[in-house]
Image (cartoon, coloured by chain):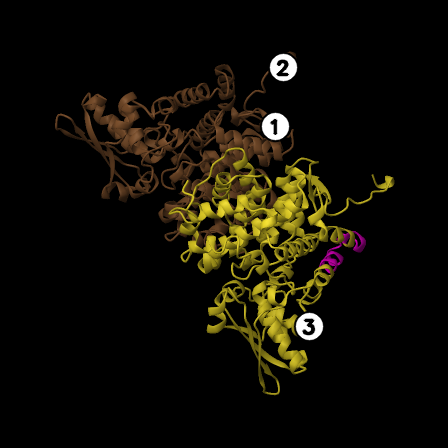
Chain colours: A brown, B yellow
Amino acid sequence: MNSTTPTAQLAAFAASLRFDDIPGPVVRRAEDLLVDWFGSTVAGHGSRPVASITRFAQAMGPQAGPSEVIVSRARTSPYLAAMANAAASHVAEQDDVHNGSVFHPATVVFPAAVATAQALGASGRELLTASVVGYEVGIRVGEFLGRSHYKVFHTTGTAGTLAAAAAVGHLLGLDARQMQHAFGSAGTQSAGLWEFLRTAADSKQLHTAHAAAAGLMSAYLAQDGFTGAAQILEGPQGMAAGMSSDADPSRLTDGLGTRWATAETSFKFHASCRHTHPAADALLQVMQAHRLQPEDLDRVVTQVHQGAIDVLGPVLRPATVHQSKFSMGTVLALVARFGQAGLAEFDRHFLDDATQSLAGRVSMELDAEVDAAYPQRWIGKVAVHTLDGRVLHGRVDEPKGDPGNTLSREEITAKALRLAAFSGGATAAEMQAAIDALWRIAGVPVVGNLLRQREVSPAHV
Amino acid sequence: MNSTTPTAQLAAFAASLRFDDIPGPVVRRAEDLLVDWFGSTVAGHGSRPVASITRFAQAMGPQAGPSEVIVSRARTSPYLAAMANAAASHVAEQDDVHNGSVFHPATVVFPAAVATAQALGASGRELLTASVVGYEVGIRVGEFLGRSHYKVFHTTGTAGTLAAAAAVGHLLGLDARQMQHAFGSAGTQSAGLWEFLRTAADSKQLHTAHAAAAGLMSAYLAQDGFTGAAQILEGPQGMAAGMSSDADPSRLTDGLGTRWATAETSFKFHASCRHTHPAADALLQVMQAHRLQPEDLDRVVTQVHQGAIDVLGPVLRPATVHQSKFSMGTVLALVARFGQAGLAEFDRHFLDDATQSLAGRVSMELDAEVDAAYPQRWIGKVAVHTLDGRVLHGRVDEPKGDPGNTLSREEITAKALRLAAFSGGATAAEMQAAIDALWRIAGVPVVGNLLRQREVSPAHV
């Protein structure tokens, strides 16, 4: 294999990164992202599609094993635990996102990395290092695949297989050549189409489950000598050839070891598709600045990038809570009514007459400046038309949760506690204990259960 | 969901087909294909990539279960058994192929269907009906995706998820609506890129393993209420939108219930990529008609369709036995030297000086007639230049194994026995007993192990 190809360089980086190579602030950010992911995973408790995938994983896997299924408190093999946890952590639409790649790293990287770390008895430092590897690889693959890819493919599902393979491969100690084979096996299993949005189907959870599991499998196979394509990303019959028309191989190796894409990742504040956040924050800005009430609004024009129109445009009359998170109108109506669009607002109010009425008066139009800045910057611009005839303009350059407008550790902890309280996946005390332990993960010699096994009284056994 | 869309119609057909709807000759052909697949699966015994996937499946799954892993004689859950058996049945390049769709149905349909039938205790008739459903669906999806798809994607991996989901969904008793959901989940996991051929990597086994397992998962999830896109095939962000530029939705419903694509499937005679077979048979014809010896040949020009050039063209100097099966030169050299290109000829002679010398004098050129007929008909044309200055033309309109030039049950049995003898995956007596039982599958009330568990003497326990 030619070590000068972009895929080979990326594989070599993934195999060789050491904890001490990672700047302290990037390690701290990785811890933030891990805690944030954990909250999103517990939030998947009680979700019907997550329960289906979890039941399947547990039925097809062993009834005991080294790896934790977080929503059910069961244990199984790392492959099936990764599958179940990846399904769980994406459903609340509260997991992190990297703007430039339009890729959600946490939900594919951490499930695979945590399940493997538990199976291997890896240390917290090893888990963090492997997770950074997964982020750095997955984000670059997402950037490489480009905007044309995202029009049809769910990048988190496709780039996600590579991200998971990189993280697991690092934990397994793959050398550069084996890592390149793992990439080959992961990329040739890359999948995930946006078509499901049109009928509000459950596929988003399947995409993350698939990516984490297929990526983990690819790394384990590579450790066993199984080979993959040398240039699965940029080769003439590789991922870009099949699934992109604007792929840029230079993105695969952009700043490896000096630019830390992990730290560019944004936290989600609203519980909706990230494409709605810039406009939501811009609307909030206008309403706060002008002390508007929802009753004051005539209509809202959001000025957006093409990707928002591609993803959100087909969602005209959301039929489910999950689909409503992809409705620009619903998100803005909830924000106008409640000052935020969190899990509780969606669950209780997405079908309210007041929500639907306002949602129907929200429109999207393509904005040249916003579109040109995307995906590096997600600018939010709105024109708010009030019933008394004013047109008020709002603008945010970094929506809440972006690196320049990030969440504090207190905010991350509070968000995770809210998510657990909403789903009922853990008690406040259990969550607080688990989060406290996760903030100290870098010092843990062996990664164990993240969530304490439930105390079962003899009467319940 | 709109029952008039092609996907909905295909799903309704898949859900509703009954054994008595299938013409007797099609049932008989399905039995032929099942026995032929079984031979190919046993042929996977001892293959390094198959062993890797089997080890992974067994390590990640339960150590006992209702479904048989044929190459290892182990038992596990249906999901992981399907994964392992699908890897096994494609490696010898002796499994069946449907010409028009360039799709290998057996290696994705039977592993999923047999594993599920064993788990459910289904009857032989139910297994055969479900298998026909898998063939009819997978072949039409392959035809739908078209030639542009096949340039980059391995159709057996991509259409294979749908084929496996259809077969398993039928065994699970899904109704039309659930079947459509299963299709949605299967299609959004469709994957498989040809890039691996360039470096002779192991991905082909991963593609079939992935397709069978992902398809099975999709059907089980649908039974549990998990939803998928309504129009995963032809929708604006579906498979065709992402992975084809010449998709034809009319192919999805072509002759449903009257045209039996199952019976159009070809058996492989040579142990190589099907794209080499027409030219191999045409060369054999010339050599037999003119009583030529390999020493008489100066060079051979094969006149082929574009798909052969796309798949075989990159393989210039095959480095492995498996890669040599994708080398037109190697295949024709073996055929010229030995009268056939079977597993033994590849294994022992692909690197011989005589093979390599002749292989280097075989070329491919695009032929307008052959290309226009493809993929419905795989015409073989060669121009043989002899050392004494003659140019002799050979032509076959149906290579050996095609429906009009098919294998008898005796030939299918003999082929399966040869494959088992070559791999050592079963003794001749074990194979004969298993094949005898498979020929009677339609009368079996409960599908059990295909291969008898090995008798283990107490000393070996």
The region drawn magenta spans B416-431
Dot 1: chain letter? A
Mark 2 crowdedness (10 Å alpha carbons): few <14, some 14-19, many ≥20: few
Amino acid at pointer 3: Gly
Residue shown at 24% from the left, 28% from the top: A283
Query: Where residue A364 sits: x, y (%)?
Result: 25, 38
Residue farthest front in this picture: B20
In the figure, is residue B137 to the left or right of B245?
Answer: right
The residue that label 3 is drawn on is: B339
Along the polypeptide, which appears first: circle 2 or circle 1?
1
Residue B440 or residue A376, whichever sits in front? B440
Mark 3 crowdedness (10 Å alpha carbons): few <14, some 14-19, many ≥20: some
Q: Where is the C terminus of chain A found, in terms of image quarters?
A: top right
The residue that label 2 is drawn on is: A460
Dot 2: chain letter? A
Query: Are labels 1 and 3 assigned to the same chain?
Result: no
Residue farthest left in this picture: A389
Amino acid at pointer 2: His
State which mark lies toward you, 2 or 1. 2
Res. B55 image quadrant: top right
Residue A64 or residue B242, whichever sits in front? B242
Query: Where residue A317 sits: x, y (%)?
Result: 32, 34
Structural distance between the alpha carbons of marks 2 and 1? 19 Å
Amino acid at pointer 1: Arg
In the figure, is residue A104 to the left or right of B73?
Answer: left
